[in-house]
Image (cartoon, helix red, strand yellow):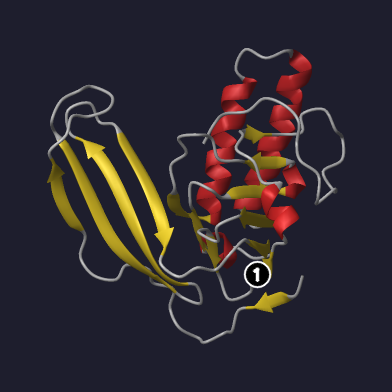
Amino acid sequence: MPEEKLPDDGGEVTIADGEPLEIRLDQPCQICGETSVFNTTVTLRLPHFGNALQTTYHCTSCGFRHSDVIMLENRGPIRCELFVNSEALLNSRVLRSNSGTIRVPEIGAVIEPATSSESFVSNVEGVLDRIGGVINVVKSGSEPDVCERCETLLGKIERMREGREHFHIVIEDPYGNSAIMARDVSVTRLSENEASALVAGEITFDLLSESQDNRNGKGAGNGSRS
């Protein structure tokens, strides 16, 4: 499929467009049953990607919350890829909708959406932190060989966070509702077959393989829904 390079317009990357609107919902919380539920919506303006709407469902009684981001312009299934080769690119915005799959091939990490996935807006470093947090959970109480592999991955992530090791971050979304906001990001249209192959799943890591150079393979190991 043809690749689209996003233009370098020299502008700042800003996404909020207006003040958030919060309303109280006349319905019980699906977790605790209390009628203390609020829904907050804010319009986002994503450079090169168009307008989007972020909604957040929040219960003030039990703390349950769920967010989603909806693109207001139909982009179709897309694949965004950024080669992170500087510390500055670690600050690039990452918008993951609840249908987006994130991959960091160099560490065999795949974050696939589960049934009740929550969207999030973070940056590249924040994605690495999420992955590192799950690896620490996997490491806890695991066999020595798995712990050793986890330590290797954590060391690699730390070098990535410090800008000492280059890597790729990829987001694939069958609905086009996810994005990486950086001037050097490339956007590729997915075919119908490629889009249909994106399934709900977990965060996974390759804890057994010695090589992390296969940029197209998924990791195999323990995971956590996200």
Q: Is residue 108 above or below residue 181?
A: above
Q: Pointer 1: residues within 10 angstroms few (<14), some, or many (20+)?
A: many
Taking the spot 46% from the left edge, 75% from the top edge, the residue there is: 47
Along the line of sight, which residue is nearer the eye, 18 or 106? 18
Determine the residue located farthest toward the front in the rendered image. 192
Q: Residue placed at 27% from the left, 27% from the top?
A: 30
Residue that protrudes farthest toward the bottom in the picture = 9
User: Could you tell whether 29 is left or right of 43 in the image?
Assistant: left
Residue at 60 percent across and 51 percent down: it is 161
User: How many numbered circles are shown?
Assistant: 1
Side of 204 where 128 appears, left or right? left
Regarding residue 152, the answer to whether it shows in the image is yes
Q: Nearer the viewer, residue 125 or 22?
A: 22
- Left or right of 52? Residue 131 is right
Q: In which quarter of the image is residue 59?
A: top left
Is residue 68 left or right of 20 when viewed as pictured? right
The answer to whether any part of residue 165 appears in the image is no
Q: Which image quarter is the N terminus in?
A: bottom right
Please tell me which residue lies in front, 137 or 188. 188
On the image, the x and y values in percent for residue 114 come to 54, 35
**Residue at the image position 46 percent from the left and 54 percent from the top:** 122
Q: In which quarter of the image is residue 201?
A: top right
Q: Which amino acid does label 1 sit on?
A: Val
| Residue with the mark numbered 1 | 187
Q: Where is residue 108 in the image (x, y as percent from the top left)?
A: 74, 41
Q: In this view, does 148 lie above or below 24?
A: above
Percent x, y for residue 118? 43, 42
> Could you say where residue 10 lies in the image, as x and y percent from the top left?
50, 86
**Element carrying mark 1:** strand
Q: In which quarter of the image is residue 179?
A: bottom right
